[in-house]
Amino acid sequence: MNRREHLLRTAPVLANWSWHAEHLVIDWSSEPPLRREELPVDSRLRLLRVEGEQTWNPARAYNFACFQARHAWLLRLDADCSPTPFFRLAEATAISRVWVGSGPEGRFGQFLMPRSCFWAVGGFNEAMRGWGFEDKDLRSRLEAHGYQLVPLPADWIDVIPHSEALRTLASPNNTGRLQRSRSLALKRAQMLANRLVAAHRPWSAQRVVSRYRQEPTGSWRAEPDSIPTVDGPAAVEIAQTRRLAYWSQFLAIPEFVVESLPEARFPAPDPTGLELHWSHLAYWFSVRRLQKALLKVLRLLMLRRPQP
Amino acid sequence: MNRHEHLVCTAAKVAAWPWHQQHLILDWSSESPLRREDLPSDPRLCLERVDGEREWNIARAYNAAIRLATRSKWILKLDADCWPTSAWTDPLLGLASNCIQVGVGPEGRNGQFLMSRSMFLEVGGFHELMRGWGFEDKDLRLRLERLCGCRLQPLPADVIGVIHHDDALRAGVGQGEIAWPLSAAYRRSLAEARIRASMLANRLTAAHAPWSQAVSASKYDNDGVVWRLRPGTLPHLAPMAAREVADARRIVFWARFLAIPEVVVEQMPFSLFPAGELVPPVRWWHRFYWHGLRPMVVLPAMLLRSARNLLHPRLKRRARSMVL
């Protein structure tokens, strides 16, 4: 979603790669839509667009992609990832059944596995929202299913370095300190919320994934009733945990203090930043920054003491 | 574990209940072993002891107990402070085999249940990688619903009696590590921090390592008198997940206990906010901070909360219903 710049750099690398039979690019409601003519002239490349999504949801997006893929093996690559010349697909598929990303930056979430393995565990957990833990959750279910996971060597995948803000915020171009702090808080909150989703709503092959229908324009749209959700007390708990974790991290306030403050003033986080009020900004620029400076001094003092 | 007073009281009440075939009490390495002669002379009552355990582990304790309870196809799980009341008559009447009756209501009723033993074993029982207190009962219910298609049927609150006690007892506050009398507020605060940390850690455990029948549970050997864990059978979390869970437990505990933002606990040196085997050790500087500085953060927040509760009773009810 909205990662055109990355795709325009990684798609030509894949077009020059000789090991794959199909390259499926999913445009998850990007604004403006990705156009086929922007991408390399490669007969293996297929561009599909999903309309009507408000936020990036890697679990649903990759499940949709894996469902649409036509071949027996799946190689997941994020928009900022591309295979290096060291990546020899034929050898990899001959050695092991399930390969998972390893190494720094965004390599961890990538994988190479047969379609049958992916769907044997039901794919990604679609009750999760946003970014974080969907890859670890998939791995733990694959392992529980008896598959042996083999790490993909780090030098098989190239990653374009980028900020956390690009992963979490709706307008990631503003990369000031405030936005970095917000994106970190949002990332933490999402990661924790997705862990609770996995605990409360474990995913499996028996779960039903979202259904999509094709529109006359050729793009796809999810049927709203088919999107899996967590409901009941678990949903309340997850929403509350996400909200408290976000504000507690962003403004560095103890969670129970956030609990005491009015929810209308400290609402659920929003990637577009709609939850921010001038009082939050005033607090962040004054108290939070002072607190950060004091913490730095304290840490320096502590580190200067001889360690036992 | 170390709940003799409760057991002596509730065992007599269970002995007076006519609807069961076997009453199995598992003494989970209590410091002074529970003696058979302290319990009612009811031939249905069996006392077993697991020796060598250093901490209370509800999941492993109940899994071991239910594997030992072989006289009936049905299991009624009751904590040491619970008993079935005389209002509960003929519990199996009209109970379908795919139905579980679960405790609802205040105090410790939520974790109690009545279900078929085979169904319990079919989902692998309780999640043995969880430690401390919290979420093991919800995790079991979720798996029973998902894997066996069980229907949950609430038990009326009046069929289970519970001895009232505070969370400090549940969280093991005052057991072993502290040698002087603690104020009620300090005990409550310590217990709340431990329980919060444990509840989150157990949720993360369930997320990282879903439990099922395929996961090998702990095994025990009997030396003729007591049971002991068979070496090498204790399940473990994968190292990366174990680190994350332990860190979350440490951070949540200190953040909650000392009313410090989690992000600050994370950034400070580990030695200042250390981790323990299960419960982080509280040092003199923590106690100093708790008595001296923490009230400055807590009191305004509590005043604000009280004011909001007075003005908006609906918010109060909602806050109570929050689990975590």
Image (cartoon, grey):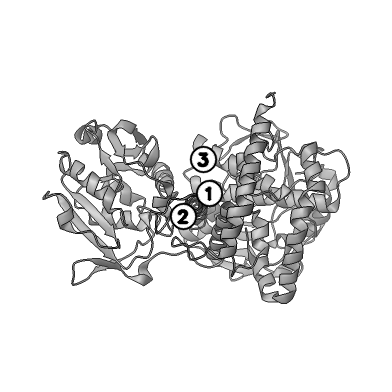
Q: Give residue A131's position: percent from left, percent from top.
A: 42, 53
- Look at mark 1 in the image and give the residue it sits on: B206
Marked residue chain, label 1: B
In the image, residue A273 above or below residue B50: below
- Look at mark 2 in the image and give the residue it sits on: A202
Q: CA distance from mark 1 to mark 3?
A: 10 Å
Q: Quadrant of residue B243?
A: top right
Q: Are marks 1 and 2 in contact (CB under 8 Å)?
A: yes
- Look at mark 3 in the image and give the residue it sits on: B241
Q: Can residue A235 be seen in the rendering of this structure?
A: yes
Q: Where the C terminus of chain B falls, by quadrant?
A: bottom right
Residue nearer the viewer, A207 or B149: A207
Q: Of the residues shown, which amino acid type is indicated by label 2?
A: Pro
Q: Give residue B109's position: percent from left, percent from top.
A: 70, 62
Q: Residue furthest right?
A: B181
Q: Circle 2 — which element?
A: loop
Q: Are marks 2 and 3 in contact (CB under 8 Å)?
A: no
- Mark 2: few, some, or many residues within 10 Å (few <14, many ≥20)? many
Q: Give residue A99's position: percent from left, percent from top.
A: 32, 38
- Mark 1: few, some, or many residues within 10 Å (few <14, many ≥20)? many
Residue at 31% from the left image edge and 53% from the top image edge: A3
Q: Of the residues shown, which amino acid type is indicated by label 3?
A: Ala
Residue nearer the viewer, B316 or A269: A269
Marked residue chain, label 3: B
Q: Mark 1 or 3, which is nearer the eye? A: 3
Residue at 38% from the left image edge and 44% from the top image edge: A142
Marked residue chain, label 2: A
Q: Of the residues shown, which amino acid type is indicated by label 1?
A: Ala
Q: Give residue A64's position: percent from left, percent from top.
A: 29, 58
Residue at 24% from the left image edge and 45% from the top image edge: A9
Discs 2 and 3 share one subunit: no
Residue nearer the viewer, B138 or A107: A107
